[in-house]
Image: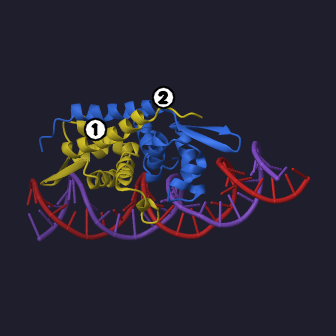
Chain colours: A blue, B yellow, C purple, D red
DNA sequence: GAAGTATGACGTAAACATACGACATAGTAT
DNA sequence: ATACTATGTCGTATGTTTACGTCATACTTC
Protein backbone atom coordinates (compact mmCIF):
# COMPACT_ATOMS: atom_id res chain seq x y z
CA UNK A 1 0.00 0.00 0.00
CA UNK A 2 2.52 2.60 -1.03
CA UNK A 3 0.61 4.31 -3.75
CA UNK A 4 -2.58 4.44 -1.77
CA UNK A 5 -3.23 7.32 0.47
CA UNK A 6 -3.88 4.85 3.23
CA UNK A 7 -1.37 6.56 5.50
CA UNK A 8 -3.46 9.69 5.44
CA UNK A 9 -6.04 7.94 7.60
CA UNK A 10 -5.77 7.31 11.30
CA UNK A 11 -4.28 4.17 12.78
CA UNK A 12 -7.56 2.61 13.81
CA UNK A 13 -8.99 3.00 10.33
CA UNK A 14 -5.88 1.52 8.79
CA UNK A 15 -5.89 -1.43 11.19
CA UNK A 16 -9.51 -2.24 10.53
CA UNK A 17 -8.96 -2.01 6.79
CA UNK A 18 -5.90 -4.22 6.99
CA UNK A 19 -7.80 -6.84 8.94
CA UNK A 20 -10.71 -6.72 6.51
CA UNK A 21 -8.33 -7.07 3.61
CA UNK A 22 -6.97 -10.33 5.00
CA UNK A 23 -10.51 -11.67 5.13
CA UNK A 24 -11.40 -10.35 1.69
CA UNK A 25 -10.71 -13.52 -0.24
CA UNK A 26 -12.89 -16.63 -0.03
CA UNK A 27 -9.84 -18.88 0.07
CA UNK A 28 -8.66 -17.25 3.28
CA UNK A 29 -12.11 -17.49 4.81
CA UNK A 30 -12.18 -21.16 3.81
CA UNK A 31 -8.74 -21.78 5.30
CA UNK A 32 -9.77 -20.31 8.64
CA UNK A 33 -12.98 -22.36 8.70
CA UNK A 34 -11.05 -25.46 7.76
CA UNK A 35 -8.44 -24.93 10.47
CA UNK A 36 -11.13 -24.39 13.07
CA UNK A 37 -12.79 -27.71 12.30
CA UNK A 38 -10.03 -29.89 10.98
CA UNK A 39 -8.69 -32.79 12.86
CA UNK A 40 -5.46 -32.13 11.05
CA UNK A 41 -4.00 -28.80 10.08
CA UNK A 42 -1.15 -29.97 7.92
CA UNK A 43 -0.38 -27.63 5.08
CA UNK A 44 -0.78 -30.24 2.38
CA UNK A 45 -4.20 -31.27 3.68
CA UNK A 46 -5.39 -27.67 3.50
CA UNK A 47 -4.22 -27.39 -0.10
CA UNK A 48 -5.97 -30.52 -1.18
CA UNK A 49 -9.20 -29.40 0.49
CA UNK A 50 -9.30 -26.23 -1.60
CA UNK A 51 -9.91 -25.72 -5.32
CA UNK A 52 -6.58 -23.98 -5.81
CA UNK A 53 -3.07 -25.06 -6.54
CA UNK A 54 -0.76 -25.84 -3.68
CA UNK A 55 1.35 -22.80 -4.51
CA UNK A 56 -1.58 -20.44 -4.36
CA UNK A 57 -2.81 -21.87 -1.07
CA UNK A 58 0.68 -21.49 0.34
CA UNK A 59 0.57 -17.84 -0.62
CA UNK A 60 -2.77 -17.34 1.15
CA UNK A 61 -1.38 -19.12 4.20
CA UNK A 62 1.52 -16.68 4.29
CA UNK A 63 -0.86 -13.75 4.25
CA UNK A 64 -2.85 -15.14 7.15
CA UNK A 65 0.43 -15.73 8.95
CA UNK A 66 1.64 -12.18 8.30
CA UNK A 67 -1.59 -10.96 9.82
CA UNK A 68 -0.92 -13.19 12.84
CA UNK A 69 -4.28 -14.90 12.45
CA UNK A 70 -2.58 -18.25 12.11
CA UNK A 71 0.75 -19.73 13.10
CA UNK A 72 2.71 -22.64 11.68
CA UNK A 73 4.94 -25.15 13.37
CA UNK A 74 7.41 -27.25 11.46
CA UNK A 75 7.27 -30.91 12.35
CA UNK A 76 9.87 -32.72 10.30
CA UNK A 77 8.82 -32.57 6.71
CA UNK A 78 5.34 -31.28 7.28
CA UNK A 79 4.12 -27.93 8.57
CA UNK A 80 1.19 -27.77 10.93
CA UNK A 81 -0.89 -24.59 10.83
CA UNK A 82 -3.29 -23.53 13.54
CA UNK A 83 -5.38 -20.49 14.30
CA UNK A 84 -3.66 -18.06 16.63
CA UNK A 85 -6.57 -17.94 19.03
CA UNK A 86 -5.37 -14.93 20.98
CA UNK A 87 -4.78 -12.74 17.93
CA UNK A 88 -7.91 -14.02 16.27
CA UNK A 89 -9.98 -12.94 19.25
CA UNK A 90 -8.34 -9.53 19.23
CA UNK A 91 -9.33 -9.18 15.60
CA UNK A 92 -12.85 -10.28 16.45
CA UNK A 93 -13.04 -7.73 19.23
CA UNK A 94 -11.84 -4.79 17.19
CA UNK A 95 -14.26 -5.53 14.37
CA UNK A 96 -17.12 -5.94 16.81
CA UNK A 97 -16.25 -2.64 18.40
CA UNK A 98 -16.26 -0.94 15.02
CA UNK A 99 -19.67 -2.33 14.16
CA UNK A 100 -20.97 -1.61 17.63
CA UNK A 101 -19.85 2.02 17.62
CA UNK A 102 -21.55 2.63 14.33
CA UNK A 103 -24.76 0.85 15.30
CA UNK A 104 -24.98 2.79 18.55
CA UNK A 105 -24.21 6.09 16.95
CA UNK A 106 -26.22 5.90 13.79
CA UNK A 107 -29.64 7.18 14.55
CA UNK A 108 -30.66 7.25 10.93
CA UNK A 109 -30.29 10.52 9.13
CA UNK A 110 -32.77 13.25 8.65
CA UNK A 111 -32.67 13.15 4.88
CA UNK B 1 -13.44 -11.03 -9.62
CA UNK B 2 -13.82 -12.74 -12.91
CA UNK B 3 -10.39 -14.25 -13.23
CA UNK B 4 -10.25 -15.41 -9.62
CA UNK B 5 -11.42 -18.80 -8.67
CA UNK B 6 -13.72 -17.20 -6.17
CA UNK B 7 -16.69 -19.01 -7.64
CA UNK B 8 -15.17 -22.30 -6.65
CA UNK B 9 -15.94 -21.51 -3.02
CA UNK B 10 -19.31 -21.77 -1.35
CA UNK B 11 -21.75 -18.92 -1.14
CA UNK B 12 -21.17 -18.14 2.51
CA UNK B 13 -17.42 -17.86 1.98
CA UNK B 14 -17.93 -15.63 -1.02
CA UNK B 15 -20.36 -13.41 0.85
CA UNK B 16 -18.06 -12.97 3.81
CA UNK B 17 -15.13 -12.20 1.51
CA UNK B 18 -17.19 -9.68 -0.43
CA UNK B 19 -18.23 -7.93 2.75
CA UNK B 20 -14.67 -7.86 4.04
CA UNK B 21 -13.49 -6.45 0.73
CA UNK B 22 -15.84 -3.50 1.05
CA UNK B 23 -14.32 -2.74 4.44
CA UNK B 24 -10.77 -3.27 3.25
CA UNK B 25 -9.94 0.35 2.54
CA UNK B 26 -9.45 2.96 5.25
CA UNK B 27 -11.40 5.53 3.25
CA UNK B 28 -14.50 3.33 3.34
CA UNK B 29 -14.05 2.71 7.08
CA UNK B 30 -13.71 6.45 7.54
CA UNK B 31 -16.81 7.17 5.48
CA UNK B 32 -18.91 4.79 7.57
CA UNK B 33 -17.61 6.30 10.81
CA UNK B 34 -18.25 9.77 9.47
CA UNK B 35 -21.81 8.95 8.41
CA UNK B 36 -22.55 7.44 11.80
CA UNK B 37 -21.53 10.59 13.63
CA UNK B 38 -22.15 13.37 11.17
CA UNK B 39 -24.86 15.85 11.61
CA UNK B 40 -24.88 16.10 7.85
CA UNK B 41 -24.32 13.36 5.36
CA UNK B 42 -24.14 15.39 2.20
CA UNK B 43 -21.79 13.94 -0.34
CA UNK B 44 -19.69 17.09 -0.66
CA UNK B 45 -19.18 17.27 3.09
CA UNK B 46 -17.88 13.72 3.17
CA UNK B 47 -15.40 14.48 0.40
CA UNK B 48 -14.04 17.51 2.15
CA UNK B 49 -13.64 15.59 5.40
CA UNK B 50 -11.33 13.05 3.75
CA UNK B 51 -7.81 13.39 2.38
CA UNK B 52 -8.86 12.31 -1.10
CA UNK B 53 -10.21 14.02 -4.15
CA UNK B 54 -13.93 14.36 -4.57
CA UNK B 55 -13.85 11.94 -7.49
CA UNK B 56 -12.13 9.25 -5.50
CA UNK B 57 -14.48 9.63 -2.56
CA UNK B 58 -17.42 9.37 -4.92
CA UNK B 59 -16.01 6.08 -6.16
CA UNK B 60 -15.73 4.73 -2.62
CA UNK B 61 -19.28 5.88 -1.93
CA UNK B 62 -20.48 3.90 -4.95
CA UNK B 63 -18.79 0.78 -3.63
CA UNK B 64 -20.44 1.15 -0.26
CA UNK B 65 -23.72 1.71 -2.04
CA UNK B 66 -23.28 -1.38 -4.23
CA UNK B 67 -22.75 -3.36 -1.06
CA UNK B 68 -25.96 -1.86 0.32
CA UNK B 69 -24.14 -0.59 3.40
CA UNK B 70 -25.23 2.94 2.60
CA UNK B 71 -27.97 4.55 0.60
CA UNK B 72 -28.21 7.93 -1.04
CA UNK B 73 -31.15 10.21 -1.52
CA UNK B 74 -31.12 13.01 -4.01
CA UNK B 75 -32.37 16.27 -2.61
CA UNK B 76 -32.25 18.84 -5.37
CA UNK B 77 -28.66 19.50 -6.20
CA UNK B 78 -27.12 17.64 -3.30
CA UNK B 79 -27.10 13.97 -2.44
CA UNK B 80 -27.54 12.85 1.13
CA UNK B 81 -25.93 9.55 2.07
CA UNK B 82 -26.83 7.54 5.15
CA UNK B 83 -25.96 4.18 6.56
CA UNK B 84 -28.46 1.50 5.60
CA UNK B 85 -29.00 0.40 9.16
CA UNK B 86 -30.82 -2.78 8.32
CA UNK B 87 -28.23 -4.06 5.86
CA UNK B 88 -25.40 -2.86 8.05
CA UNK B 89 -26.72 -4.91 10.94
CA UNK B 90 -27.06 -7.95 8.71
CA UNK B 91 -23.42 -7.55 7.75
CA UNK B 92 -22.51 -7.19 11.40
CA UNK B 93 -24.41 -10.34 12.24
CA UNK B 94 -22.86 -12.48 9.54
CA UNK B 95 -19.34 -11.43 10.46
CA UNK B 96 -20.02 -12.04 14.13
CA UNK B 97 -21.35 -15.47 13.32
CA UNK B 98 -18.24 -16.27 11.31
CA UNK B 99 -15.96 -15.20 14.14
CA UNK B 100 -18.12 -16.92 16.70
CA UNK B 101 -18.17 -20.23 14.88
CA UNK B 102 -14.43 -20.27 14.61
CA UNK B 103 -13.86 -19.25 18.22
CA UNK B 104 -16.24 -21.94 19.46
CA UNK B 105 -14.82 -24.59 17.25
CA UNK B 106 -11.15 -23.93 17.51
CA UNK B 107 -9.86 -25.81 20.48
CA UNK B 108 -6.27 -25.17 19.61
CA UNK B 109 -4.51 -27.81 17.60
CA UNK B 110 -2.45 -30.67 18.81
CA UNK B 111 0.68 -29.62 16.98
C1' DG C 1 -31.77 30.82 -21.04
C1' DA C 2 -27.01 31.65 -19.06
C1' DA C 3 -24.00 30.97 -15.40
C1' DG C 4 -22.99 28.51 -11.53
C1' DT C 5 -22.83 24.32 -8.49
C1' DA C 6 -23.07 19.48 -6.84
C1' DT C 7 -22.65 15.03 -8.58
C1' DG C 8 -21.78 10.87 -11.19
C1' DA C 9 -19.61 8.60 -15.31
C1' DC C 10 -15.56 7.84 -18.20
C1' DG C 11 -10.77 7.26 -19.26
C1' DT C 12 -6.40 5.99 -17.71
C1' DA C 13 -1.84 5.39 -15.32
C1' DA C 14 0.25 3.25 -11.67
C1' DA C 15 0.13 -0.03 -7.90
C1' DC C 16 -1.51 -4.30 -6.23
C1' DA C 17 -3.65 -9.06 -5.98
C1' DT C 18 -4.30 -13.64 -7.80
C1' DA C 19 -2.91 -17.87 -9.71
C1' DC C 20 0.32 -21.07 -10.94
C1' DG C 21 4.50 -23.43 -13.07
C1' DA C 22 9.27 -24.09 -12.23
C1' DC C 23 12.94 -24.13 -8.98
C1' DA C 24 15.15 -24.38 -4.27
C1' DT C 25 15.38 -26.35 0.27
C1' DA C 26 15.21 -29.52 3.82
C1' DG C 27 13.82 -33.55 5.92
C1' DT C 28 12.91 -38.87 5.25
C1' DA C 29 13.75 -43.23 3.82
C1' DT C 30 16.04 -46.86 1.25
C1' DA D 1 24.59 -41.00 -0.93
C1' DT D 2 20.24 -41.27 -3.78
C1' DA D 3 15.69 -40.86 -4.48
C1' DC D 4 11.54 -39.12 -2.66
C1' DT D 5 8.34 -35.91 -0.30
C1' DA D 6 6.44 -31.66 1.74
C1' DT D 7 6.99 -26.86 1.62
C1' DG D 8 8.36 -22.33 0.52
C1' DT D 9 10.25 -18.81 -2.91
C1' DC D 10 10.60 -16.66 -7.44
C1' DG D 11 9.07 -15.09 -11.76
C1' DT D 12 5.41 -13.72 -14.37
C1' DA D 13 0.97 -13.25 -16.86
C1' DT D 14 -3.37 -11.50 -16.18
C1' DG D 15 -6.99 -9.17 -13.77
C1' DT D 16 -8.37 -5.61 -10.25
C1' DT D 17 -8.10 -1.51 -7.29
C1' DT D 18 -6.90 3.17 -6.41
C1' DA D 19 -6.62 7.85 -7.51
C1' DC D 20 -7.63 11.63 -10.10
C1' DG D 21 -8.45 14.81 -14.15
C1' DT D 22 -11.91 15.79 -17.45
C1' DC D 23 -16.39 15.65 -19.15
C1' DA D 24 -21.54 15.11 -18.89
C1' DT D 25 -25.79 15.85 -16.35
C1' DA D 26 -29.13 18.04 -13.79
C1' DC D 27 -30.76 21.26 -10.63
C1' DT D 28 -30.72 26.35 -8.99
C1' DT D 29 -30.59 31.06 -9.37
C1' DC D 30 -30.21 35.25 -11.71
**Residue A109 seen in the current view:** yes
Residue A66 x %, y %: 56, 40
Decide which of A109, A45 is in the foreground and name it. Answer: A45
Q: Nearer the viewer, mark 2 or mark 1?
A: 2
**Disc 1 chain ID:** B
Mark 2 lies on residue: A86
Question: So how many labels did they put on this image?
Answer: 2
Considering depth in this image, is A81 or B37 the residue closer to the camera?
A81
Q: Secondary structure at mark 1?
A: helix
* Residue sitting at x 57%, y 33%: B110
> Pointer 1: what residue?
B34
| Closer-to-camera residue (A70/B40) | A70
User: Residue B45: x, y in percent?
Assistant: 25, 43
The spot of residue A99 in percent (x, y) is 30, 36
Against A26, is A16 above or below?
A: above
Q: The C terminus of chain B appears in which quarter of the rendering?
A: top right
Amino acid sequence: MTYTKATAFDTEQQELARLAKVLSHPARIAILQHLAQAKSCISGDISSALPLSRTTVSQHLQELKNANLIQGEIDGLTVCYCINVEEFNKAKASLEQFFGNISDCCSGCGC
